[in-house]
Image (cartoon, helix red, strand yellow):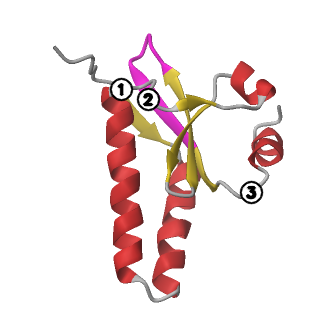
Amino acid sequence: MSDAVNYCSEILVTAMQDMTSIVSMYLMLGSKSGAIRIKNAFDKGISQLESFPYSGVQVPDEKLAKFGFRMLIIEKYLVFHKVFDEERKIVIYHVLNGTTDYPTLMKRIHDL
């Protein structure tokens, strides 16, 4: 028996812009295959969250975790999301390079 559940996902405009920029970067660097690979990885990761909403990890930063942010690691990127159990929904907020100072950036973006 599977533990999979069906949640819907909502990708906010900010996250969509993040993913578009990442895919575009691969294209600008001349790697069409890289762009396709990372787009497919994002799609697969988000689909995974819809079936297993807690498959990502709690954000290590205490303040971000307190506000319910979780992250899914896809290659070198972090997909920041929240799980809303009552609505059976996953909201994707941002997709950031894991090498950035994401706690500071996320706190600044979301006024935390």
Determine which residue is flagged by label 3: 100
User: Residue 60: x, y in percent?
Assistant: 71, 31
- CA neighbours of label 2 inside 10 A, class few (<14), some (14 to 19), many (20+): some
Residue 68 appears in which quarter of the rendering? top right
Q: Which residues are magenta?
A: 84-93
Q: Which residue is mark 1?
A: 52
| First along the sequence among labels 2 and 3 | 2
Asked if the residues shown at circle 2 and circle 1 are in contact, with their CB atoms under 8 angstroms apart, the answer is yes
Q: Quickly name the residue at label 2.
A: 55
**Residue for point 34% across, 70% down:** 36
Residue 89: image tag: none
Q: Which residue corresponds to the image point at 78% horizontal and 25% vertical from the top-left? A: 62
Q: Secondary structure at mark 1?
A: loop
Q: Amino acid at mark 3?
A: Thr
Residue 43 location (% of width, % of height): 34, 51
* Tag 2 and tag 3, C-beta contact below 8 Å: no
Picture quarter with the C terminus: top right
Q: Is residue 74 above or below residue 52?
A: below
Q: Residues within 10 Å of mark 1 (few under 14, many from 20)?
A: some
Amino acid type assigned to the residue bearing label 1 in the image? Phe
Residue depicted at 43% across the width and 37% down the height: 10
Q: Residue at x 46, y 24 (%)?
A: 54
Q: Count residues near mark 3 (Cα–Cα under 10 Å), then give few for <14, some for 14-19, many for 20+.
A: few
Separation of marks 3 and 1 at Cα, in angstroms: 26 Å
- Quick check: marks 3 and 1 in contact, CB under 8 Å? no
Amino acid type, residue under disc 2 in the picture:
Ser
